[in-house]
Every structure is written in structure tokens, then in C-alpha cells.
Image: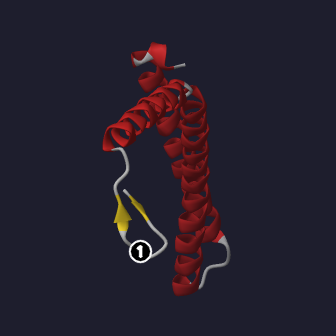
Amino acid sequence: MAKSAKGHATNRNLATGSGERHERLADFETRLGRARGRGGDATGAQARSSAMGTAFRISSELVAGLLVGGLIGWQLDKWFETSPVFLLIFFILGAAAGIWNVIRTALAMQSEAEREPGEK
């Protein structure tokens, strides 16, 4: 229904109005179906986003291992009043732990990719 200049509702042909609504709804459903059919772009964006997240996780684990090992070694050197002995030892241990986490994550990703070969 449309409103007149005075604000009162005027009767429009409701059959035509509902027919127009039906046509517009059918057109909308057609356009929506076409847009959903182009979902490959969204899937590619999700894959890139997932790859970036994985890369950030791997680099964070490596850096965290180095930092934690270095901080533990530095603190032990302060407590025992030794020079860089514990710093070097725990820095190397932190690096080894970070590299081990990277390897473990890469192996998990590889086994997941082998289970789902159709995803690429």
C-alpha cells in the first residue's frame, strides 16, 4: 500500500503488488544462487588466511622457544652468578624446542593433507 500526500494509505492493486513481490523474490533467489556459485573466491581467501595463520603459528612457536630458553638461562645466570653459561645452554635448548615444535606442526599438516587429497 502506498501513502497519499496526506499520509493516508491508498489501496493499490494488491494482486499486482504481490505479483511484483513474487517476481522480485524469484529474481533475488536467482542472483543469490549465482553469487553462491562463485564461492571459489571465498574458498581461496579462506585457504590463504589459513596458510597465513599456520605460518604465524609456526614462527611464533620458534620465537617463543628462543625467548623462553634465553630468559630461563639469563635468570639462572643471575641467580648463580655465572657468566653466559646457562644463557647459552638454555638458548640452545629453547632453539631446539622451537625447531621441534615447527617439525611437529609440519608433520601434522602433512598427514592432514594426505588424508584429504581432494581439498587442493
Closer-to-camera residue (102/90): 102
Residue 26 picture quarter: top left
Give the left or right position of residue 99, taking residue 21 as reference: right
Q: Residue sitting at 37 percent across and 34 percent down?
A: 19
Q: Residue sitting at 47 percent across and 14 percent down?
A: 117
Closer-to-camera residue (113/63): 113
Amino acid tagged 1: Gly
Q: Is residue 56 above or below residue 111?
A: below
**Callout 1 secondary element:** loop
Closer-to-camera residue (16/46): 16
Q: Residue sitting at 58 percent across and 69 percent down?
A: 86
Residue 41, x across and y down, in percent: 61, 31
Residue 17 picture quarter: top left
Q: Is residue 4 above or below residue 31?
A: below
Q: Residue sitting at 54 percent across and 41 percent down?
A: 50
Closer-to-camera residue (26/10): 10
Residue 53, x across and y down, in percent: 56, 47
Residue 1, x across and y down, in percent: 36, 56
Name the residue beneath numbered marker 1. 7
Q: Residue furthest top?
A: 118
Give the left or right position of residue 89, taking residue 12 as reference: right
